[in-house]
């Protein structure tokens, strides 16, 4: 459930299937990839100041750094059709 949150959110919000460590690929199924310190623990969205940690490989990043890494790993670009509000796969 998404709650109303007064904090800023990252422009890219990873879907559940994209929520994995960009370094080793670990997901949160065993609790190994998670937001260790979040600005609003009740909000399910990613915030720029959130601190993300992977227990499997030691990867650490801010919410902003994680969003950028996942955009690059998933080969996404800003969608021109929706005036930059979403992301789509980059065409080859």
Image (cartoon, grey):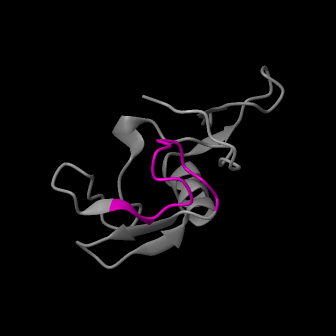
Task: Please provide percent x and percent y for residue 30.
Answer: 15, 55
- 72 over 14 or under it: above or below: below
Magenta stretch secondary structure, dominant: loop
* Nearer the observer, 90 or 18: 18
The residue positioned 59% from the left and 65% from the top of the image is 65
Q: Quadrant of the C terminus?
A: top right
Residue 3: horizontal and vertical position, in percent?
53, 33
Q: Position of residue 71 (x, y in %)?
A: 57, 49
Outermost residue, top side:
81
Residue at 26% from the left image edge and 58% from the top image edge:
26
Horizontal side of residue 46 vs 16, given as left or right: right
* Whether residue 36 is situated above or below residue 47 in the rendered picture: below
Numbered disc total: 0
Give the residue drawn at x 28%, y 76%.
57
At x 62%, y 37%, the residue is: 90
- 42 or 49, nearer to the observer: 42
In depth, the one of 74 and 33 nearer the eye is: 33
Q: Residue furthest left?
A: 30
1 to the left or right of 13: left
**Outermost residue toward the bottom?**
58
Res 12 quadrant in image? top right
Part of the protein shown in magenta: 34-48
Quarter occupied by the N terminus:
top left
Which residue lies most toward the right here? 83
Residue 71 lies in the magenta stretch: no
């Amino acid at each position: 459930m998404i709650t109303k949150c007064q904090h800023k959110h990252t422009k890219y919000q990873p879907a559940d299937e994209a929520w994995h460590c960009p370094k080793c690929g670990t997901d949160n199924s065993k609790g190994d990839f998670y937001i260790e310190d979040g600005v609003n623990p009740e909000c399910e969205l990613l915030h720029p100041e959130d601190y993300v940690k992977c227990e499997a490989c030691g990867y650490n990043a801010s919410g902003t750094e994680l969003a950028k890494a996942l955009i690059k790993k998933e080969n996404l670009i800003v969608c021109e059709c929706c005036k930059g509000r979403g992301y789509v796969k980059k065409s080859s």
